[in-house]
Image: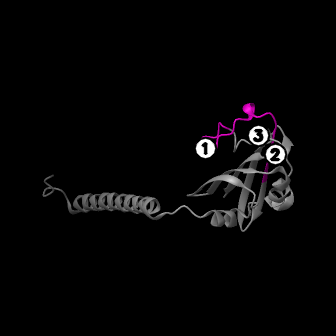
Amino acid sequence: MFNTGALPLDAKLMMTTRKLALYLLIGAVGIAMCVAAGYVGVQIVFFQEPTLSEVEEEIAIDLPDSATDLQYSHARFFELNVYLRFNLPPDDLPELLSQICQGEFALEDGFVSRYISSEASSNPSWFNPEPDAMTAYSGGDCRIITKQQLYTYSILIDESDDNLHEVFLSVIAE
């Protein structure tokens, strides 16, 4: 590299210290990248989608037994994101709603949450309600702190069919 023989001892030490600091920095960045890649790799290889009962426990909701055509997605990185889509007879809707935000939850006709709207880019492809195609719908949002976490519940209910409502439920826990 450089001929350092003609430099005073202080300059040689300073160059050595700088090199050492650079090597330590490069090493620290390399270790951090390996740890991050390992964490993501472990999540991808060993992560198993939780069962529906595990999801229900995590979001503090027991879906009515009459819920059919159920689809759900569960993702956790920094926060928990759960998406559920299912059909439910209208008579069983109060049972579901009573569990959301400790029963302090009200539906509004024509309400579409920003967490459920088709513009929400993080939604799974099957979780894409089209309110414009629904003849009647209602929805709502609420936030509550339980289990040391802030939960945001958002729901949209397609009421177009008088005998069977399609329910879109999003739960975010931070």
Q: Secondary structure at mark 3?
A: loop
On the image, numbered disc 3 is attached to which residue? 112
Viewer-nearest residue: 95 or 109: 95
Q: Secondary structure at mark 1?
A: loop
Which amino acid, by three-letter code, is at mark 3? Val
Which amino acid, by three-letter code, is at mark 2? Asn
Left or right of 170 on screen, residue 27 = left
Upstream in sequence: badge 3 or badge 1: 3
As measured in the structure, the alpha-carbon distance from the residue carrying label 2 to the one carrying label 3 is: 22 Å
In percent of width and height, residue 150 lies at 72, 59
Q: Nearer the viewer, mark 1 or mark 2?
A: 2
On the image, numbered disc 2 is attached to which residue? 163
Q: Secondary structure at mark 2?
A: loop
Proximity of marks 3 and 1: CB atoms separated by less than 8 Å: no
Upstream in sequence: badge 1 or badge 2: 1
On the image, numbered disc 1 is attached to which residue? 126
The magenta stretch spans residue 21 = no
Proximity of marks 1 and 2: CB atoms separated by less than 8 Å: no
In percent of width and height, residue 114 lies at 71, 41
Identified at 73% across, 64% down, the residue is 60
In percent of width and height, residue 128 lies at 65, 40
Q: How many marks?
A: 3
Viewer-nearest residue: 30 or 59: 59
State the extent of the magenta-drawn residues as a range. 118-142
Which amino acid, by three-letter code, is at mark 1? Trp
Q: Which residue is situated farthest in the front direction here?
A: 163
How crowded is the residue under tag 3: few (<14 C-alpha within 10 Å), some, or many (20+)? many
